[in-house]
């Protein structure tokens, strides 16, 4: 029992450490670190509760005099401090976003909105979202599953999330899943976001798209464009507004969302549907890849570049420089900060610049 308690405490501490400490130079183990950090960061409150229960169980069964208790408790307390830091960062996100909005739109921007919209924006997440983190379904949301938007089989399907109450011309949120362009599914990511926005009166659309290495890039952005075209042509049948589309995604999905927002009508990615308007009204990109060329030298190691070259694009920068250049969202942003043909962008970060490995950074214009 003593060894189990110390082992569980050490595991808890290491898990909490992955939630707050970013590492890169650990080879393939970075995926384990990332996965652990994801779980510990998202479920910090639940993990603290479980660890408190474990400490209480130890005290009830073995007391506090065993030497192992002091070691285990010290590790547990350190884990709680780290998880509390992760929670603090999560709670601070809303304040950081508000500061960015006030900086971009003016301190009184909320007063310029209709009263009904202000009330919706001020609504807070209910406590049940914390108590039941895996309960995604909502009584006010209905679904239309596996609608084909392309001829790519299962990878060309999308799901539509709708309010139960009938309505017309509701704003549309298009979700693009992440997964290093190689994995992921439309039903796995952004479920809390999609359900929350539908409860707020939106229509949600979550898509699959073709994955590497079976389908090399730019198949992925082409599919996102096809999905936008489908929304433009068909979402009115589901009560959505084809003239108000916001694209969102994280990681690889954030990269594809940025590209979609910055390249409306780019003919190389719209073969066969060039005449369809693929412009969007907004982009919410979370931790996206912004530069496939590494032009600012932010990435100090060749592993990521090799991965993109071999597995995703399956060409080199020497043989296909335009693919890497056009596939980098930062390439589509002009020096003066204006996006060529894209929607308005709000960049919200605790850092004024893109922070990179080893202290390097590059300016972000948006």
Image (cartoon, rainbow, N blue to C red):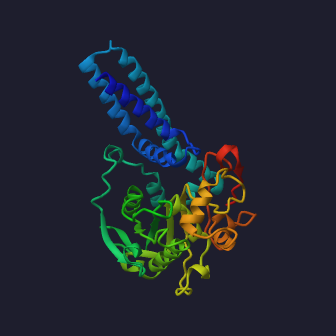
* Residue 165 visible: no
Q: Quadrant of the N terminus?
A: top left
Residue at 32% across, 43% down:
131
110 on left or right of 318:
left
Residue at 35% across, 39% down:
46
The quarter holding residue 167 reads bottom left
Report x, y in % for residue 157: 38, 74
Asked whether 265 or 119 is in front, the reply is: 265
Residue at 47% across, 55% down:
121
Q: Quadrant of the C terminus?
A: bottom right
Q: Residue furthest left?
A: 61
360 on left or right of 8:
right
Residue at 51% across, 49% down:
28
Give the mark count: 0
Report x, y in % for residue 287: 55, 54
The quarter holding residue 111 reads bottom right
**In the image, is residue 29 above or below residue 118?**
above
Q: Residue furthest right?
A: 336
Report x, y in % for residue 91: 49, 42
**In the image, is residue 165 above or below residue 109?**
below
Q: Residue furthest top?
A: 65
* Residue 182 visible: yes
The quarter holding residue 139 reads bottom left
332 on left or right of 120:
right
Report x, y in % for residue 264: 59, 76
């Amino acid at each position: 029992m003593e060894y189990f308690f110390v082992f569980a405490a050490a595991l808890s501490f290491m898990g909490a450490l992955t939630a707050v400490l970013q590492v890169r130079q650990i080879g393939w183990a970075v995926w384990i670190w990332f996965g652990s950090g994801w779980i510990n960061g998202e479920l910090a409150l639940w993990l603290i509760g479980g660890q408190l229960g474990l400490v209480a169980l130890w005290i009830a069964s073995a007391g506090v005099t065993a030497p192992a208790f002091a070691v285990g408790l010290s590790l547990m307390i350190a884990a709680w401090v780290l998880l509390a830091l992760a929670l603090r960062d999560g709670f601070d996100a809303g304040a950081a976003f508000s500061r960015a909005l006030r900086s971009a739109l003016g301190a009184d921007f909320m007063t310029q909105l209709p009263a009904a919209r202000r009330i919706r924006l001020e609504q807070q997440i209910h406590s049940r979202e914390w108590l039941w983190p895996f309960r995604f379904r909502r009584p006010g949301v209905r679904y239309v599953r596996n609608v084909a938007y392309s001829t790519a089989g299962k990878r060309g399907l999308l799901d539509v999330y709708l309010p139960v109450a009938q309505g017309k011309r509701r704003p549309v949120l298009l979700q693009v899943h992440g997964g290093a362009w190689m994995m992921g599914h439309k039903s796995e990511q952004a479920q809390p976001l999609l359900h929350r926005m539908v409860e707020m009166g939106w229509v949600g659309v979550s898509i699959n798209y073709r994955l590497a290495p079976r389908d090399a890039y730019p198949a992925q952005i082409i599919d996102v464009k096809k999905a936008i075209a489908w929304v433009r042509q068909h979402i009115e049948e589901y009560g959505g507004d084809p003239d108000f589309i916001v694209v969102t995604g994280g990681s690889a999905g954030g990269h594809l969302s940025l590209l979609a927002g910055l390249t409306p009508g780019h003919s190389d990615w719209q073969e066969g549907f060039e005449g369809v308007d693929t412009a969007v009204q907004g982009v919410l990109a979370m931790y996206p890849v912004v530069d496939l060329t590494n032009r600012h030298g932010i990435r100090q190691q060749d592993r990521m570049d090799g991965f993109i070259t071999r597995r995703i694009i399956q060409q080199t920068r020497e043989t296909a420089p335009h693919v890497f250049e056009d596939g980098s969202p930062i390439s589509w942003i002009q020096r003066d900060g204006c996006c060529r043909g894209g929607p308005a962008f709000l960049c919200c970060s605790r850092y004024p610049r893109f922070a990179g490995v080893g202290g390097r950074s590059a300016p972000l214009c948006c």
